Amino acid sequence: MNIYEQTPDMDTMGGRLSRAREAAALTTKDLAWRLGVKVATVNAWERDRSQPATHRLNMLSGLLGVSISWLLHGVGTSPVEPVERASAEKVASQLEKLTSLHEETGELIGRIGKELGNLGRINKSLLEELTAGE
């Protein structure tokens, strides 16, 4: 999909930066340390009081797993939001449960197959006894 066909994220650059940082599970202190800037600088960016220099945008993009175009304009690769992460965890949990149920179902099918085999042998024996007595 072309980034120009996407509906842009209408938040401010500071808002997008804040959301991406939170989605990456980083505090402002962590992000500032990784970028080599002061916490006050990150806070100013997130409050739209100033904007990061070009080389910092590139670093931010890499650290936060978003595209520079998303940070600047709201189009492009956005962060995995916590809701999406929770949904992924829920789906993974459901898959694990289904896998367990699938294994259990396979075991039950095997037991039923054995029981049917035993019943078939019993029926065959009974039929032989009945026909032998005639």
Image (cartoon, rainbow, N blue to C red):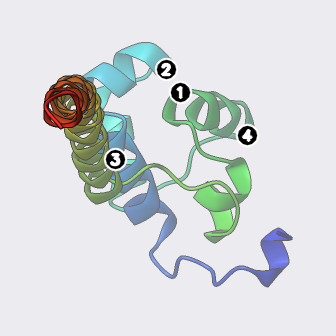
Number of marks present in the image shown: 4
Q: Amino acid at mark 1?
A: Leu
| Mark 4 and mark 3 residues within 8 Å of each other at the beta carbon | no
Residues packed near mark 2 inside 10 Å, few (<14), some (14 to 19) or many (20 plus):
some
| Mark 2 and mark 1 residues within 8 Å of each other at the beta carbon | yes
Judged left or right of residue 15, residue 13 is right
Judged left or right of residue 45, residue 1 is right
Q: Secondary structure at mark 2?
A: helix
Residue that carries the numbered disc 1 in the rendered image: 63
Choose top left, top right, bottom left or bottom right for residue 19. Answer: bottom left
Residue that carries the numbered disc 3 in the rendered image: 88
Q: Residue at x 44, y 52 (%)?
A: 17
Q: Quadrant of the N terminus?
A: bottom right
Numbered badge on residue 31: none
Judged left or right of residue 10, residue 72 is right
Q: Earlier in the sequence, mark 4 or mark 3?
A: 4
Q: Residue at x 36, y 15 (%)?
A: 33
Q: Give the spatial CA distance, label 4 vs label 3.
A: 33 Å
Asked if residue 100 is positioned above or below residue 87 in the image, the reply reads: above
Question: Which tag is nearer the camera, tag 3 or tag 1?
Answer: 3
Judged left or right of residue 67, residue 79 is left
Residue that carries the numbered disc 4 in the rendered image: 54
Q: Secondary structure at mark 4?
A: helix
Q: Give the spatial CA distance, label 2 vs label 4.
A: 13 Å
Q: Give the spatial CA distance, label 2 vs label 1.
A: 9 Å
Residues packed near mark 4 inside 10 Å, few (<14), some (14 to 19) or many (20 plus):
few
Question: Which tag is nearer the camera, tag 4 or tag 3?
Answer: 3
Q: Earlier in the sequence, mark 2 or mark 4?
A: 2
Q: Give the spatial CA distance, label 3 vs label 1.
A: 21 Å
Q: Secondary structure at mark 3?
A: helix
| Mark 1 and mark 4 residues within 8 Å of each other at the beta carbon | no
